[in-house]
Image: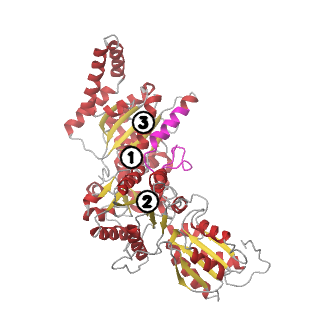
Amino acid sequence: MVIKDTPLLDQINVPSDLRKLDENQLQQVADEVRQDMIQSVSHTGGHLGAGLGVVELTTALHYIFNTPDDRLIWDVGHQCYPHKILTGRRDKMLTMRQGEGLSGFTKRKESEYDPFGAGHSSTSISAGLGMAVARDLAESDNHVVSVIGDGSISAGMAFEAMNNAGALKSNLTVILNDNEMSIAPPVGAMSAYLSKLLSSKSYLSLRDIMKKIATKFPDPMEKAAARAEEFARGMVQGGTLFEELGFYYIGPIDGHNMDHLIPVLKNAREEAERGPFLIHVITQKGKGYQPAEQASDKYHGVSKFDIVTGTQVKSQPKAPTYTKVFGETLTELAKHDDKIVAINAAMPSGTGLNIFDAAHPDRCFDVGIAEQHAVTFAAGMACEGFKPFAAIYSTFLQRGYDQIVHDVAIQNLPVRFAIDRAGFVGADGSTHCGAFDITFLASLPNMIVMAPSDEAELAHMIATAAEIDNCPSAVRYPRGEGNGAELPEKPEALEIGKGRIIREGKSIAILSIGTRLDDALKAADSLASMGINCTVADARFAKPVDTELVHKLASEHDLLVTVEEGSIGGFSTQVMDYVVRNDLTQGLKIRNLFMPDTFQDHDKPEKQLADAGLDADGIQKTILDALGKDNMGHNIQNSPAGLVE
């Protein structure tokens, strides 16, 4: 389906314009939105498949509900591009996920139509319930609609929210966007008819009347009548679980058929005072764009692509990604150690464990969007003598922190955390930035935290983690390609808590942790051309810190600079603590470089690093400023000290 013109969409700037149209025009609007989205994402890249699957649903929701007064909350936000097109941001879609442009997720400061920002899953029902209760307290009468996917609703937080919503009986509509099923035509037609009937005022009234009549029966008969209806609804529609949680279940309905969507949404809106509704909507990820429909991942996340062929424009890799190196290294180690097992939380390919799964399917576990469970599940396996590697993005590992503390660290269990996407993540912005893992892990007793400077070091650190059997450990590494380091034929375990000096210099020492080492070396090269020779060291371990190395650098140099792609309170804090406790500050100038104490917006990774002062230029500038020199290496007259001495 290709639409060259968008006559109806051209009339729509905000949803109130959409609501001026006739119902029979809505499918054309949806078709135009879908084409517009394909066009824009082909230029920018981004999340495509999820948005294509909810075009009709998005159009119907904005048509039936009075947004922004009615609150519409999208879980995660991968599917929010059609929503952005219909809510005044169509002319900015070509700035998606670029510096100063639109976020790839919903964002409160971006639009009044985004009542809740999201980047992690399973939050929409909790947030929606909070808004609904606040509305009730304020004696307002607007509607609240929370959209959540079938993957996200399996997370514990979603069930906690539904349980609470059912008990409070607030006016809340939850849309379960289920894109893992397909409806055969007869089943779909019957389901649509039943959903329309069961959500109608006449049926709801009849149901209440029957309940009242049933109360006049003896208890056994009353219970039998109630169970008969519940059983019938559950058999036909699968809604028994949601009914038990206190929701009025409707569905499943075809999420691509306006004739099915519109009447059900209308009925739910008009009868919302009866308590929480859950509308089960079946959609197809990638709907309406053949290359996406046929792709195994339904074009979930894409780079720029050719619309006609669907071919994505991808740069030729110069080196393997850290993710791939992790997956291949762990897979090889597992060939020789049958106690190694791997765990991920709905991100097998994103963490490289698809490689492991292909070789060791009986030892690879995808637990779904359930990071808390993943951590404690790994702890349980460690109790029984296995060697679990929990591969979880830095930003998602935050969700399992309580379990890391209580179920792993306090019990000193040898769970190994493979932390992908540590540091800046570019276009995914602040919600996915791996800023805090060094800080929140290095603060825990019993924890070993490693960070490789290149992909060869990563291989050695995975081998190191495999041999650590007396405490928990973690290896953090960034998104993207390595720097081309030659990979070891057989990775070897490193000595715990020992760094290395890469280059010897005088007066100035740069102590780097992780992949900032390359930029530290580049800064040292530039400074050498000014006659300033630096020692450059690779810490390797954020915990335990190599105190012998720190002592040497602090006592033999006039300026010590630490560099880490992480938040305040991390590696530099450990270094500073040792330096101060051992009275090494006499005559020593110290500069600590880490991420700014802000949530940085999406941009190119190199721009984020530059803004943070963590690239080669930033490191060099910090050193020159500390020495009271300009960018040519000349002394600055009357320069303020501003130093830690």
Q: Give the foreground label among 1 and 2.
A: 2
* Numbered label tally: 3
Amino acid bearing label 1: Ser
405 sits to left or right of 575: left
Check disc 2 and report the residue beneath it: 393
Residue 110 appears anywhere in the view? yes
**Residue in view at x 24 percent, y 37 percent:** 188
- Residue 498, image x and y in percent? 50, 75
Amino acid bearing label 2: Tyr
Residue 294 highlighted magenta (yes or no): no
Q: Nearer the viewer, residue 20 or 381?
A: 381
Residue 114 highlighted magenta (yes or no): yes
Please provide the residue range marked out in magenta: 106-134
Q: Is residue 75 above or below residue 23?
A: below
| Number of other residues with Cα within 10 Å of mark 3, as a class: few under 14, some 14 to 19, many 20 or more | many
Amino acid bearing label 3: Met
104 sits to left or right of 351: right
Check disc 3 and report the residue beneath it: 162
Q: Earlier in the sequence, mark 3 or mark 1?
A: 1
Check disc 1 and report the residue beneath it: 152
| Magenta highlight: main SS | loop
**Which type of secondary structure does the marked residue at label 2 adopt?**
strand
Q: Is residue 632 above or below residue 162?
A: below
Q: CA distance from mark 1 to mark 2?
A: 16 Å
- Residue 43, image x and y in percent? 41, 62
- Residue 257, image x and y in percent? 30, 39
**Which type of secondary structure does the marked residue at label 1 adopt?**
helix
| Number of other residues with Cα within 10 Å of mark 1, as a class: few under 14, some 14 to 19, many 20 or more | many
Q: CA distance from mark 2 to mark 3?
A: 27 Å
Q: Earlier in the sequence, mark 2 or mark 3?
A: 3
Q: Is residue 268 above or below residue 555?
A: above
In which quadrant of the rendered view does residue 456 lie?
A: bottom left
